[in-house]
């Protein structure tokens, strides 16, 4: 709370007198009736009128002691004794919000800044002009406009630094009542962070675009081959055999994609129901390795398991956990192929949190890609992944399954050395 122009915050004395008249008129009217009765009873006219005027003045000018006590006890905003107290009450309420808020005066000076505003825009010295912290011309223009016109303004503000953020901004005049009918206008500048919802919107549109693109590519190739077989290659037995093999591959790819999409939407539906089965990960990982042996042989990769002797039980859904480790180990074989070795290490169990790490010795993943790996259709290298029959949905499914299992996925990677994906239960 700061350097506010205190004299500017006082109500005009005539306004105060009129307000008081509004409150005390029943007392004045009743005493006037009594005065009339006294006059008609023949009591001295001058004495009666003099007494009534005296009473009226006392009633109007007296400070209402009873109300002062009430104010101190309950402090409702509408009866704050002074503009400063009223501003303190407004600021205390705004201090509890988690959205950044500033309170400004007519001169565009900051009277109050809440904790969220300090965090988002840094601490501003008391009484500083708003432009000391927020320099966007559009924002300053809207603040000026609201102060001049008395109308609220809503607009969007994009900040590039320190990080890219989008805010929905509102500048609104607020009347703070105080005392007996006094009013003071301050201006509330509040920010709603839209960055996250914008990011989700973008992801949603990207998702639809990606899904249709991924389906369109194999479909176009199928159509091309069908047309060729109906036309130029009608009687070419050898070409037909080759084309049919490619068509089968494309159709398999499409059905994989559709299966993955369905799997994602089913997982989304039950995101909030934690699984209730008990699953021992030791045999489960052995089973996944066995299922991936043909692929590993084809890629010339050796999968080595480092498993404890006992059990490693977690609460989970068996089929979903198989999907998680299948994708992690398959990725390690496909994308870390040049390292020729994949290690799967299980630690914990018997009361100690269980962790499974799948590591490869391949090319690694550059740091800027790591946070985006679990986005749908995100691939570090689209062509390389597609040539390995990847759809880019595997890690998105892994993340969904792990969220449902209250488990975390930690990725550590070093370029040229390899990547380790750890699942922490
Ligand atoms: N161990 C790894 N080493 C290097 N890059 C990896 C590794 N694991 C994943 N990636 C990168 O992350 C991307 C996303 O992996 P994800 O499993 O989600 O999709 P995918 O393997 O391409 O497709 P899908 O799993 O649906 O077959 C991959 O395309 C690849 O670029
Ligand atoms: Mg994958």
Image (cartoon, rainbow, N blue to C red):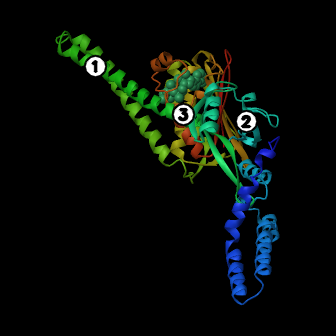
Tell me if 214 is positioned left or right of 306 in this view. left
Discs 3, 1 touching: Cβ within 8 Å: no
**How far apart, in angstroms, are the residues tagged by discs 3 and 1?**
44 Å
* Disc 1 target residue: 244
* Disc 2 target residue: 107
Q: Earlier in the sequence, mark 3 or mark 1?
A: 3
Dot 3: few (<14), some (14–19), or many (≥20) neighbours within 10 Å? Answer: few
Tell me which residue sits at (77%, 50%) in the image. 10
Q: Nearer the viewer, mark 3 or mark 1?
A: 3
Whether the residue carrying mark 1 lies under 8 Å from ligand 1 is answered with no
* Disc 3 target residue: 198
Tell me which residue sits at (82%, 34%) in the image. 125
- Secondary structure under tag 3 reads helix
- Secondary structure under tag 1 reads helix
- In the foreground, 406 or 155: 155
Tell me if 423 is positioned left or right of 57 in this view. left
- In the foreground, 145 or 400: 145
- In the rendered image, residue 343, in percent from the top left (x then y), is placed at 65, 27
- Secondary structure under tag 2 reads loop
Q: Is residue 246 above or below residue 93?
A: above
- In the rendered image, residue 56, in percent from the top left (x then y), is placed at 76, 72
Tell me which residue sits at (38%, 28%) in the image. 212
């Amino acid at each position: 709370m700061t350097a506010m122009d205190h004299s500017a915050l006082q109500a005009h004395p005539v306004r105060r007198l009129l307000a008081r008249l509004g409150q005390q008129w029943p007392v004045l009217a009743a005493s006037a009736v009594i005065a009339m009765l006294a006059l008609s009873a023949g009591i001295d006219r001058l004495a009666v009128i003099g007494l009534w005027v005296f009473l009226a003045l006392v009633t109007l000018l007296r400070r209402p002691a009873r109300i002062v006590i009430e104010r101190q006890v309950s402090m409702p905003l509408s009866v704050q004794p002074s503009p400063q107290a009223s501003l303190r009450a407004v600021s205390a309420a705004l201090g509890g919000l988690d959205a950044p808020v500033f309170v400004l005066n007519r001169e565009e000076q900051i009277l109050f800044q809440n904790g969220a505003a300090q965090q988002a825009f840094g601490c501003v010295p008391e009484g500083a002009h708003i432009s000391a912290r927020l320099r966007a011309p559009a924002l300053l223009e809207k603040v000026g406009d609201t102060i001049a016109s008395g109308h609220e303004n809503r607009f969007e503000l994009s900040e590039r630094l320190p990080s890219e953020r989008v805010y929905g901004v509102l500048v609104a005049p607020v009347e703070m009542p105080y005392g007996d009918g006094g009013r003071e206008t301050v201006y509330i500048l509040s920010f709603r962070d839209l960055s996250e919802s914008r990011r989700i919107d973008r992801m949603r549109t990207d998702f639809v675009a990606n899904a249709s693109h991924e389906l369109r590519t194999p479909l176009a190739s199928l159509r091309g081959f069908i047309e060729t077989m109906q036309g130029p290659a009608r009687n070419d037995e050898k070409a037909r055999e080759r084309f049919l093999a490619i068509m089968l591959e494309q159709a398999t790819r499409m059905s994989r994609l559709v299966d993955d999409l369905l799997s994602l939407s089913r997982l989304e539906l039950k995101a909030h129901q934690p699984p209730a089965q008990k699953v021992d990960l030791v045999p489960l990982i052995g089973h996944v390795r066995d299922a991936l042996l043909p692929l590993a042989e084809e890629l010339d990769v050796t999968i080595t398991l480092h498993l404890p002797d006992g059990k490693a039980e977690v609460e989970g859904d068996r089929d979903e956990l198989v999907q998680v480790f299948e994708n992690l180990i398959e990725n390690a074989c496909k994308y870390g192929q040049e390292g020729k070795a994949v290690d799967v290490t299980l630690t914990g169990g018997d009361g100690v949190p269980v962790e499974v790490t799948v590591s490869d010795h391949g090319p690694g993943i550059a740091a800027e890609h790591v946070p985006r790996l679990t986005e749908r259709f995100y691939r570090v290298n689209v062509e390389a992944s597609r040539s390995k029959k990847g759809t880019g949905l595997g890690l998105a499914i892994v993340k969904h399954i792990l969220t449902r299992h209250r488990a975390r996925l930690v990725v550590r990677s070093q370029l040229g050395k390899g990547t380790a994906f750890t699942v922490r239960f």
